[in-house]
Image (tube, grey):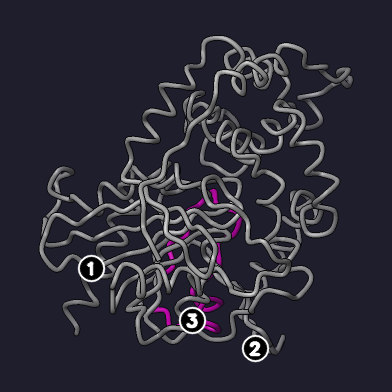
Amino acid sequence: MPISPARLEVSPGELDDLRDRLRRTRWPRPWPRAGEVMPDDGPLLRRLAARWATDYDWYAEQAAINALPTFTAEIDGAPVHYLLYRGESPGALPLVLTHGWPSSFLEMPRLARRLATPSLHGGDPRDAFTVVVPSLPGFGLSPQRPELPATVGTHELWHRLMHDQLGFERYGAHGGDLGAGVTSLLAQEHPESVVGAHLLAVADPPDVDPGTLTADERDYQRSMRRWFAEDGGYEHEQMTRPLALGHGLSDSPVGLLAWIVEKYREWSDCDGDVSRCFPDDYLLTQASLYWFTETISTSFRPYYEYAQGWTARVRRVDVPTAVAAFPKDLTLPPRSWAERTYNVTHYTRMPRGGHFAAYEQPELLARDLTEFFRAMKESA
């Protein structure tokens, strides 16, 4: 099917509507001791909303997005948006990078440029990759699939994009969050094409004998239960009542902003000050992408489909696998836990960084990806 350039075009009327909604925001009554007994993003949201409604230059951001190497391919009747960065060296290994939630393809260009043109960042051009950054269905410029549940898994769309559309017989794959699940399934189902999988999170093994757990694994399970009880409310809501949430966030730009900015603050290595990791305009551009493409509600579909049992499960990944554990990410699986499901040949505990590592620490992540795939090439 045809591959064509993709562009994002927002009309003046759409921008005026957003700014009008922002100016008319009805802010909640403050709670006593807010910010003392619980995190309170109220002051941050008021500052961001004020900029979003006035000084934020959407059209400059739109031009920057349209200047990216951005394309759309139609696969099984589904348009799939992606970025394509050609490697600077002949024979550069193709590599597909998959984002998660509440992110988008905009998380990846810092990393992709380092991987595609390492010589511009102090690296060896022989380590170059040809990098493909698809947008998950229902995120940004990739519309949701028209059927529920989807008849073709996202990992299958990625394989058809990489192998059938772009002509890559063999390629590597990387992902975190939802993207880690897509990457795992891609490696599980297509070991003939995926030379290696690089992950920021791992799937739990389908069956575990509690008597075989190590002390580190028991600590990890306790930390996961604690995280879900204290911080997993968003996930439970998106798994069980996504439409109710979608109605609210699709109508209120500040509601949308609050829902995603909390995650950027909580899940990044910012010590509670989100501006340490993300400029205001980056956060506003991510929110604007969700707003203008009307995809915040459809971005919840992977959670609901997984909870309904409509998504394939990771059973065993036998291709060489790397795990990069960033200290402020949601989970820090020990190597032995990952090895229950994956053929782990490379494991790295990172010194800093969080859930959005491709943006927070692109140099560290690029180095780990390069080392993993270089070792595979040398041993081949």
Residue under label 3: 342
Taking the spot 33% from the left edge, 40% from the top edge, the residue there is: 68
Q: CA distance from mark 2 to mark 3?
A: 17 Å
Magenta span: 323-344
**Whole-percent x, y for residue 183 in the image:** 48, 69
**Whole-percent x, y for residue 130 in the image:** 25, 60
Choose mark 2 or mark 3, whichever is in front.
3
**Whole-percent x, y for residue 158 in the image:** 45, 68
Q: Secondary structure at mark 1?
A: strand
**How many numbered markers are drawn?**
3
Q: Earlier in the sequence, mark 3 or mark 1?
A: 1
Say whether residue 248 is left or right of residue 212.
right
Check residue 93 in the rendering and tell me which mark sits there, or answer none.
1
Q: Secondary structure at mark 3?
A: strand
Q: Is residue 337 magenta?
A: yes
Say whether residue 94 is left or right of residue 108.
left
Q: Residues within 10 Å of mark 1 (few under 14, many from 20)?
A: many
